[in-house]
Amino acid sequence: MSGIELGGPAPDFTLRDQFGQDVTLSSFRGRKVVAILFYPFAFSGVCTGEMSGIRDRLDEFLTFHTEVLGISCDPVYAQRAFADQDGLNFPLLSDFWPHGEVARSYGVLDEDRGAPRRSSYVVDRDGVLRWSVHNPGPQPRDLDEHLARMRALV
């Protein structure tokens, strides 16, 4: 499914979060392990459940040594409404324009739907891809597995 290799560099990107602020993946290099969670659509059932699950365990996902970034192709304004409605207080990044460019660089853009697949990556402090998982559309992620993969690199 993915066109990138584990053990290789994570494709860098700069995307806007729900507040219109730029977030650059490489800015975490040397400091934090990063979980990147691509999700198809804000406000959809499974995505809402997953992002709420992260919100409920935010103290585990966001530490001095770890960061979590949610990415969809929804515009910044939709990301903001989604975050406000569900109390999501971690970066939700908009890969809206050029549409799906980052999802495409990670090999997870579903071109027919115009949305990323439900895929996750863990990037170590050196910017190297160390783990990935690609869930079928309706199957939610195992957040415990994500946390275990992140903690193994801290």
Image: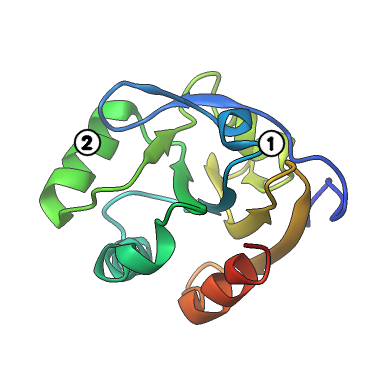
The three-letter amino acid code for the residue at tag 1 is Arg
Identify the residue at horizontal 32%, vertical 63% (top origin): 58
102 vs 145, nearest the viewer: 145
Residue 80 is labelled as: 2
- In percent of width and height, residue 20 lies at 30, 21
Identify the residue at horizontal 81%, vertical 40% (top origin): 9
How many residues crowd mark 2 within 10 Å: few (<14), some (14–19), many (20+)? Answer: many
The three-letter amino acid code for the residue at tag 2 is Arg
Disc 1 versus disc 2: nearer the observer: 2
Point out the tag, 1 or 2, that comes first from the N-terminus.
2
Q: Is residue 111 above or below residue 88?
A: above
- In percent of width and height, residue 1 lies at 78, 57
Query: Residue 136 lies in what quarter of the image?
Result: bottom right
Question: In what quadrant of the picture does the C terminus appear?
Answer: bottom right
**Secondary structure found at label 2:** helix
- In percent of width and height, residue 41 lies at 39, 50
- In percent of width and height, residue 134 lies at 66, 65
* Left or right: where 54 falls relative to 15: left
Q: Is residue 43 above or below residue 55?
A: above
Residue 55 is labelled as: none
Residue 104 is labelled as: 1
- Whether the residues at callouts 1 and 2 have beta carbons within 8 Å, the answer is no
Identify the residue at horizontal 45%, vertical 42% (top origin): 72
Query: Residue 61 lies in what quarter of the image?
Result: bottom left
How many residues crowd mark 1 within 10 Å: few (<14), some (14–19), many (20+)? Answer: some
**Secondary structure found at label 1:** helix
* Left or right: where 40 falls relative to 75: right
